[in-house]
Image: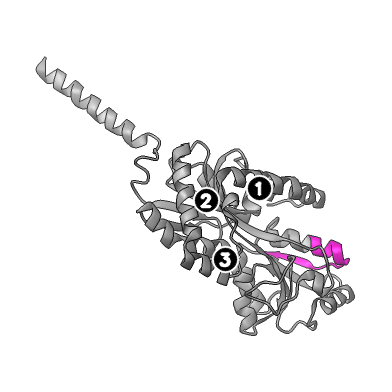
Amino acid sequence: MLQARREFLQACLVGLAAAAQSAPASGADYPARPVTIVVPFPAGGPGDTVARTLTEQLRESLNQPVIIENVSGAAGSIGTGKVARSNPDGYTLVLGYWGTHVVNAAIYSLQYDVMNDFEPIALLTSQPLIIVGKKNMPADDLKSLIAWLKANPAKASQGTAGLGSIGHVAGLLFQAATDTRFQFVPYRGTAPALQDLVAGQIDLGITTPVTAMPQVRAGHIKAYAIAGERRLSVAPEVPTVSEAGLPGLHVSFWQALWAPKGTPSDVIARLNRAVRDALAHPATRQKLIDHGFDIPSPDEQTPAALRAFQQAEIDRWLPIVKAANVKGD
């Protein structure tokens, strides 16, 4: 009888321990182990740069290792879907952007909802895109590039980070605004597309300054215009699209951090504090600024602000993507 009671008590203790391990984390004891941030693109791209720039300060704030995991494919939907299906305990997050958390909803048959299957943590950075070309393109400025494209319809090619990526949609807007035609070549991310542009395998790119400007500085590619309202401090010599003769083509690449739906609110608050601390750190801010990123104001860094911003982006871009009938594989 005594032996049976001991076995029963041991079984109860084992069950309680298992339940404690599987219970959602709370702000009081979170984090108790390393945190993984999934970047749904290859290493070397703009999202990867932002994640790795923030990592050091996030480690200090959370007092735990922060691991970057690159999971690329399908314009970021593979890595994003992995996080949507992960445990909502605050230990697996996703660094998403305009594509993964806005337009992929109109392009791919997703197994998750871009808005409702995630808990917003914070908006991280934004950056206007830059129009670039291979170094031996005949045109040296945007007006002459447009003239060359009109004179050579469907002969040029633009590399993108996949169907429906921000570079692809920006290319569609560029074609509509200039009455030009060229081919789109999809890649698994921004970095490999830029590699082929440097090698001269493709002709054009509409990409982020953080990846393009080092190659521009090295003379490997040409810069035509910034798709924003003002020149960048990291590229003051590159005119805006308005200055270059194509007003209104404003496309911004932004990054933000999300957790799976159901992550406890106190864990979200803890992560938000860590992100805000990182974005406020002088050295981290300077690194991001040096890469050409804009940092949102403190009021724009709250979870509620990210949710409202994401909804506004969905309302703006989904009609454009649907009208273009862009569909993924």
Q: Nearer the viewer, residue 314 or 164?
A: 314
Q: Nearer the viewer, residue 59 or 5?
A: 59
Residue 94: mark: 2
Q: Is 183 within the magenta?
A: yes
Q: Is 130 within the magenta?
A: no
Pointer 3 residue: 45
Label 1: which secondary element: helix
**In-image side of 216 versus 245 (left or right):** left
Residue 139 occupies which quadrant of the picture?
bottom right
Q: Earlier in the sequence, mark 1 or mark 2?
A: 2
For the record, the magenta segment spans: 173-186
> Which quadrant of the rendered structure holds the N terminus?
top left
Q: Earlier in the sequence, mark 3 or mark 1?
A: 3
Q: Nearer the viewer, residue 262 or 248?
A: 248
- Report how far apart the C-alphas of labels 3 and 1 lie in the structure: 23 Å
Q: Earlier in the sequence, mark 2 or mark 3?
A: 3
Q: Residue at x 62, y 43 (%)?
A: 307
Label 3: which secondary element: loop
Residue 260 x %, y %: 51, 42
**In-image side of 178 versus 79 (left or right):** right
Instruction: Say what amino acid the circle numbered 3 marks.
Output: Gly
Q: Residue at x 42, y 60 (%)?
A: 57
Residue 309: mark: 1
Instruction: Say what amino acid the circle numbered 2 marks.
Output: Val
Residue 304 occupies which quadrant of the picture?
top right
